[in-house]
Structure formats: structure tokens, C-alpha cells
Image (tube, rainbow, N blue to C red):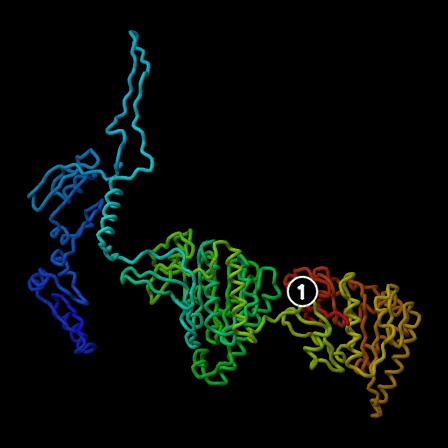
């Protein structure tokens, strides 16, 4: 096999020497290398046809392009300053049509005559140095190919009387040809047909074709593999006209944050779909966990069942969003400790060391502006994730319609940027600095930066389909295929409180938190963790709120689990006339609706606890039994407060003897301001600040709550939701349904 012929022509000997040494070093005895530094030899050589595998010619020598069979036809409206002296000196033929100024005519012809031309197509031709200088009329290729009427002209015939009045008697107008080809079209068509007939192949295109407006994603063709150390995803095809190549545009999804900006309906959501699909096809849920915040079209919610996706947050899911941010923040702290224990400083180093227990986490955000306006005004937890997440394997992909609302703090945390078509051209400069390229107004067309160079690109179409419903169906089909492929694997779900919180769920998942001294009031919306109530520390719990809000259900729940966690317990229940606690009657030592037994019960309980107290002091106490007192009757609060003996007994039960296994629950406590003159029990409730309030926090009167907490919890509560006020703290919880 012959060696490839490489010809390098350049008059700069010092420069060409360095290239020659490089070729010898890298390709010694592998190529036939020819170095040309003499211009005359170069001209003589290419007077005859030459064959070369690689031809490198400097700009100086390229001026003699005619010897290489290269001819230039240059057209311009303004020659001054646009055409240099080298081009003028190598241009034998000069054709000048009508120009605006004499200066332009002088620039081309060295004569002002072309500025005086009036007729379209009229021009002066100059060959050489005035070898030929003549006025000519250029042909018009846009004329019809054929005319059925010949050279008919428009004219009118009038009848004129002796008074000079004219009357139209005949009018001729050439008929317009419909669907007629121009002469240029006819010539091109003739040449085309002739070449096909003679089997003459079309010459190769000088430039690559334009990017297709639609390129369907094909992982087998465009995928980047599944290298866990370098998580790259193909997003489309970029065009490099300088080097005449078109290649796939790739984003490193793991090592940097990615920002996508573009006008609505031009492909931002589709690009996010491409990235999610690329992740799913190349990596398992053990390798990558995806979380999505969709505040745009909510099309991304169709990925919710995908094994790689731990959850999708929509605009109405405010609690779910808080849980997601808290989970990611907790992951940052947790992963820092893991990396520290191994002795590495980054997630990439952790993976290089061979550890695979921590998956890469990718957070997708569609429509950042809406997210910021709704949820990030008071506490911007997302900024922390963007700034500190990369080092521990948490990256963010953010899409927005504009960059102006992001701010410098966010922009500085996104190394990878892509800009789709924007109505405001200033967006391109905001994203890439000095950027002169403007993408075409085509969905999916945009600008991408590769190796510090900006290119125009066309993003893949994530899922085929002419209509959106067809693409969504294909998206759902893809989800099913991936779930089948990764059966048994799933990303960790966003910590979330079940919409229907059953008592069995609480007990089964948090059984280790229950004991004789601790009970679970519910699940906190802020932490998605159980709220534990220490019975001995605060043995009096007040329940207040509006009607039909879940107060009675909670009392039944807490009583049931007191019996479940204590083998020896006596219940004393004083219900009202509605008997909402009537289902507990068979489990009670005392169940009274009238209230007649209340005072006696209080006095007897005080005596019992007093005796236990004395036994405890003397060291003889062996009684581990529990007593639970439930007063769910508003009238009894006044009765107890008016009776000094009963009131004193109640104070001792909830104060002096509270450590002696006694739990008091006050139900149906009125939601009113505790002022001077109210029953004494209400004052004790206010002093203890141990209250479970069912209702909107802004309507809470029984206890003062800081305005900042009220503003934070503006969302209307649902049945079973309550605010647990303990001391100076307040948190929203969901109480379980009673069994």
C-alpha cells in the first residue's frame, strides 16, 4: 500500500521547519512528505494536475489559486473597505452595475461612469487594465420560459368626439402566466435532466448541509456510554462551519450545574426530557437518582413512575417541595461526613476510589422564575444546593425563559450554559458574554459552548410524535420499558407524609419511638419525622380548635396507643353530650357524660397519687400502673375551676404528681383569649403552653404565636392537621387516624 502524500506549502521557512519536525516525529516513515517554500516552484508544480491526500497551503501562496483550478466570483454592494488589494490585483474581470456614488464606481472601474447608470441591468465591463471597457445590458433570467401571447404590450383604443370627449372602445393587457417557470428554472432543470441521462454524478457539496430541524434521540447512535466516572449525556448535534464538521453536543451531567434559557415553546422542556432519557438509558437507579421540580407545563410529571425518579414536585405541592429541599440539604451534610471518613475531598475522588454506595443526584427545575416567586423569597435553600452540592455528587439542571431573574449568585454556580431561541437578543450576551451568533427561530435550535467556543446546535427530539399526546404515550411506554429493565431498583423517594395517615402506619414505621413515657402526636410537615410527646415531662395536653377538624379522632388515637404501650392502665373519660368518645366506653374505668363523677374522680386520683408519692419517698413504691384522665366537656372546666377542692386536686395531678404515671388530656378547650376572669383551668393551659390546635393558625386565640410563624403557615389546613405549640416552638403536624 502506497504511503499517503502530504504536501505543505509556505514561504515562511522558520514556521514550516517546526511543522516538518513534528511530522517526522509523529509520522516517520508513514507518509510521503513534501515541503515547498519556493513560490515559482509551487506555480510550476500545479500547472499540471496533482494528486495529494493532504494539501496545506499558506494564504500567500493561495493567491495563485487559478493554478489550482480555484476561481472566485465576488459580489458586493459596497466595495470600499470590503475588497482588499490582493483580491483587486488578482481580479482580471470587473463588472459594475448601477452604484450610488462616484466613489464606489471609482473603486471598481477607476471611473465615475457607473454612478450615472439609470436602467436596471445596465453595467460597465472592464477586462484587465482597460483592455476592454464597454457598456452592456445584462440578461434577465427571471423572465417566463414561454409566452403564449408573444410580445404583446399593453395599450388602449379610445373614440374621440368633436368636443374632445374620450370613450374607451378596446383595451389589451397581456395575460399573466400561471405556474410558469422562469428561464433560470428551465436551464437548471435541463442541466439536471441531462446529467441524469448521461450518468454524470453531482459534485460534492462545498459545505455540510444545514442542521435538520428535527433529530430524534437514538441512544444507540448518539449515546455516550455508561462511564460512571464521567457522566456524559448527548443532547443534540452542533455545527462547526470553520472545520466543516457536525458532531454530537455532550453535557457532563455529574461534575457541573447546567443552565438552559430560552423562550417558551422553543424546546426547554424537551431538552430536559432528553437529559432524563439519556440518564435512564445509560445508568441504573443505583447510579443516578433524579428529582424533578416542574413549574412549567407539568409534562415532566409523566416521569414520576420512572425507576430513576424519586419524585416530581408541582406548584401545589408546597410541603413536598420543602421535604425535597430538606432531603437534599441533609444529603449534603451526610455525604460530607462519608467523604471525610474516607479521606477524600470530592465525590469524583470517592468514585475513583471504588465506592459505589452513594448515587449521583440530579435535580431538574423547569421554570425557575415561578419557583423563586412562590417559594424562595424568604428562605432560598436552592442556593445552598447549587453552591455546595457538586462536591458531594448533587448537580442541578435549571431551565428558565430568561436569565434576568436569576441574578449573579445563581449564574456563577452554573458552568454549563445553553441558550435556545430568545426573543431578547441580549440574552445571548448575558449567557455567553460577547456572542455574535444568533440561532434560527426553530424549536430545539440553540447555542452551546464546547471547549470555550460557541456553536449553533439542534437538540434531539426526546420522544417521537407529531402531536403532544403521541409523545406522552411514547414517554409512558419508555418508562415501562426502563422499569422492566431495572426491576427491583428504585430511587429513594422524596420523604412525604401519606395523604391518609393511618395509626398502623405510624406504629409500624416508628415502633421504636413508642414506650411507656413517649407517645407520637403525629408527623411533622417540616421534618417529615414523628413528633414525640414526653408524657412525664408534660403530663397535661390541651386540645383546641374548630369543629369537625379531627380533635375527637386524635383523642381516640392517643388513648388507644396509651393502652397499646401500657399493659396496666386505667382510663377516666368525661365526655360531653355529643358522645364523640363513646367508642371508648368499654375500655374505660369511668365513662361519664353528665360530669357528676368528675370532682370525686379528681379527689380520688389525688389521694392515690399522694399515697404513691409517700411510698416513693419511703422507697416502698412498686406500682407501675398508669392513669389517663380525659376531660372532653367544656362545662366541667368551669365546674372544676369553681370548686376549690377539685381545682387544687387538678393542680397537684398536673403539677406536683406529674411524674407518677398520670396523663391528662383536655379536649374541646375553647379557642378564646385567656384574660382576667376566665376559669382557672384555662390559665393553667396558657401557662403550660402545651397545646394542640386544630385549625388555621391565623385564627388561633388561645395562645400567642409569632407573626413570622403565622405567615409561614398560610396554607389552609385539612382535617387532621394541627399545630403543636410547645413552649416557644410551633410546628405543623398531621395526626393519625384512630383505629
Residue 446 visible? yes
Q: Is residue 138 left or right of residue 305?
A: left
Look at mark 1 in the image and give the residue it sits on: 706
Which secondary structure, mark 1? loop
Q: How many marks?
A: 1
Q: Is residue 613 left or right of residue 246?
A: right
Q: Is residue 555 left or right of residue 611?
A: left
Q: Is residue 674 left or right of residue 32?
A: right
Residue 372 visible? no
- What is the quadrant of the C terminus in the image? bottom right
Residue furthest bottom in the image = 619
Viewer-proximal residue among 299 and 181: 181
- What is the quadrant of the N terminus in the image? bottom left
Residue furthest front in the image = 197
Quadrant position of residue 660 = bottom right
- The residue lying at 80 percent from left, 80 percent from top is 658
Quadrant position of residue 239 = bottom left
Mark 1, other Cα within 10 Å: few <14 / some 14–19 / many ≥20: few
Quadrant position of residue 69 = bottom left
Query: Where in the figure is residue 188, as x and y percent of width and height?
Result: 25, 46
Viewer-proximal residue among 663 and 233: 233
Query: Where in the figure is residue 607, as x and y percent of width and height?
Result: 89, 81
Query: Where in the figure is residue 615, as x and y percent of width and height?
Result: 85, 89
Query: Where in the figure is residue 626, as x and y percent of width and height?
Result: 82, 82
Residue furthest top in the image = 162
- The residue lying at 21 percent from left, 39 percent from top is 100
Amino acid at each position: 500500500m502506497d504511503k499517503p502524500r502530504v504536501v505543505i506549502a509556505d514561504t515562511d521557512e522558520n514556521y514550516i521547519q517546526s511543522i516538518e519536525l513534528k511530522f517526522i516525529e509523529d509520522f516517520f516513515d508513514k507518509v510521503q512528505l513534501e515541503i515547498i517554500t519556493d513560490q515559482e516552484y509551487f506555480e510550476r508544480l500545479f500547472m499540471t494536475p496533482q494528486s495529494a491526500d493532504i494539501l496545506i497551503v499558506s494564504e500567500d501562496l493561495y493567491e495563485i489559486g487559478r493554478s489550482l483550478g480555484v476561481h472566485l466570483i465576488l459580489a458586493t454592494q459596497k466595495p470600499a473597505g470590503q475588497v482588499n488589494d490582493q483580491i483587486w490585483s488578482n481580479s482580471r474581470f470587473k463588472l459594475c452595475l448601477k452604484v450610488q456614488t462616484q466613489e464606489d464606481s471609482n473603486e471598481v472601474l477607476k471611473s465615475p461612469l457607473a454612478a450615472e447608470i439609470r436602467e436596471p441591468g445596465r453595467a460597465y465591463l472592464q477586462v484587465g487594465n482597460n483592455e476592454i471597457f464597454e457598456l452592456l445590458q445584462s440578461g434577465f433570467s427571471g423572465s417566463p420560459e414561454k409566452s403564449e401571447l408573444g410580445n404583446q404590450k399593453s395599450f388602449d383604443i379610445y373614440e374621440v368626439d368633436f368636443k374632445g370627449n374620450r370613450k374607451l372602445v378596446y383595451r389589451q393587457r397581456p395575460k399573466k402566466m400561471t405556474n410558469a417557470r422562469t428561464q433560470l428554472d428551465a436551464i437548471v432543470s435541463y442541466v439536471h435532466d441531462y446529467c441524469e441521462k448521461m450518468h454524470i454524478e453531482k459534485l460534492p457539496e462545498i459545505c455540510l448541509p444545514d442542521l435538520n430541524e428535527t433529530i430524534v434521540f437514538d441512544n444507540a447512535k448518539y449515546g455516550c456510554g455508561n462511564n460512571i466516572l464521567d457522566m456524559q449525556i448527548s443532547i443534540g448535534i452542533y455545527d462547526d462551519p470553520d472545520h466543516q464538521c457536525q458532531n454530537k453536543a455532550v453535557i457532563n451531567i455529574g461534575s457541573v450545574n447546567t443552565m438552559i434559557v430560552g423562550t417558551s415553546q422553543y424546546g426547554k422542556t424537551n431538552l430536559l426530557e432528553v437529559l432524563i432519557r439519556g440518564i435512564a438509558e445509560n445508568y441504573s437507579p443505583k447510579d443516578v437518582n433524579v428529582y424533578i421540580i416542574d413549574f412549567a407545563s407539568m409534562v415532566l410529571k409523566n416521569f414520576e413512575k420512572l425507576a430513576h425518579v424519586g419524585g416530581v414536585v408541582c406548584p401545589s405541592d408546597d410541603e413536598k417541595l420543602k421535604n425535597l429541599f430538606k432531603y437534599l440539604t441533609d444529603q449534603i451534610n451526610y455525604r460530607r461526613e462519608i467523604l471525610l471518613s474516607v479521606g477524600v475531598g470530592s465525590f469524583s475522588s470517592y468514585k475513583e476510589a471504588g465506592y459505589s454506595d452513594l448515587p449521583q443526584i440530579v435535580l431538574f427545575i423547569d421554570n425557575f422564575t415561578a419557583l423563586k416567586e412562590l417559594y424562595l423569597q424568604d428562605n432560598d435553600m436552592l442556593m445552598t444546593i447549587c453552591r455546595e452540592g457538586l462536591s458531594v455528587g448533587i448537580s442541578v439542571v435549571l431551565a428558565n425563559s430568561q436569565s434576568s431573574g436569576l441574578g449573579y449568585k445563581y449564574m456563577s454556580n452554573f458552568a454549563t450554559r445553553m441558550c435556545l431561541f430568545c426573543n431578547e437578543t441580549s440574552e445571548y450576551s448575558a449567557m455567553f458574554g460577547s456572542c455574535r451568533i444568533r440561532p434560527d427561530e426553530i424549536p430545539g435550535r440553540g447555542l452551546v459552548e464546547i471547549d470555550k467556543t460557541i456553536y449553533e446546535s439542534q437538540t434531539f427530539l426526546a420522544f417521537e410524535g407529531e402531536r403532544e399526546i403521541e409523545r406522552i404515550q411514547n414517554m409512558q411506554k419508555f418508562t415501562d420499558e426502563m422499569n422492566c429493565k431495572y426491576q427491583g431498583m428504585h430511587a429513594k423517594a422524596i420523604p412525604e407524609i401519606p395523604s391518609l395517615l393511618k395509626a398502623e402506619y405510624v406504629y409500624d414505621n416508628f415502633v421504636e419511638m413508642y414506650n411507656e413515657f413517649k407517645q407520637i402526636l403525629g408527623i411533622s410537615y417540616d421534618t417529615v419525622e414523628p413528633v414525640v410527646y414526653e408524657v412525664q415531662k408534660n403530663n397535661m395536653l390541651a386540645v383546641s380548635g374548630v369543629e369537625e377538624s379531627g380533635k375527637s379522632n386524635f383523642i381516640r388515637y392517643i388513648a388507644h396507643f396509651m393502652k397499646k404501650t401500657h399493659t396496666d392502665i386505667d382510663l377516666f373519660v368525661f365526655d360531653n353530650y355529643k358522645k364523640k368518645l363513646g367508642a371508648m366506653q368499654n375500655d374505660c374505668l369511668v365513662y361519664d357524660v353528665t360530669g357528676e363523677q368528675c370532682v370525686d374522680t379528681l379527689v380520688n386520683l389525688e389521694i392515690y397519687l399522694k399515697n404513691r408519692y409517700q411510698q416513693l419517698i419511703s422507697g416502698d413504691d412498686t406500682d407501675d400502673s398508669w392513669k389517663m384522665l380525659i376531660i372532653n366537656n367544656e362545662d366541667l372546666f368551669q365546674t372544676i375551676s369553681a370548686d376549690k377542692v377539685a381545682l387544687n386536686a387538678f393542680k397537684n395531678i398536673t403539677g406536683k404528681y406529674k411524674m407518677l404515671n398520670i396523663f391528662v388530656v383536655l379536649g374541646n378547650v375553647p379557642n378564646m383569649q385567656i384574660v382576667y376572669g376566665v376559669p382557672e383551668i384555662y390559665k393553667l393551659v396558657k401557662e403550660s403552653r402545651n397545646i394542640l390546635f386544630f385549625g388555621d393558625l391565623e385564627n388561633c386565640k388561645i395562645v400567642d404565636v409569632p407573626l413570622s410563624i403565622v405567615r409561614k403557615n398560610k396554607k389552609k389546613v385539612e382535617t387532621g392537621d394541627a399545630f403543636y405549640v410547645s413552649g416557644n416552638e410551633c410546628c405543623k403536624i398531621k395526626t393519625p387516624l384512630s383505629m
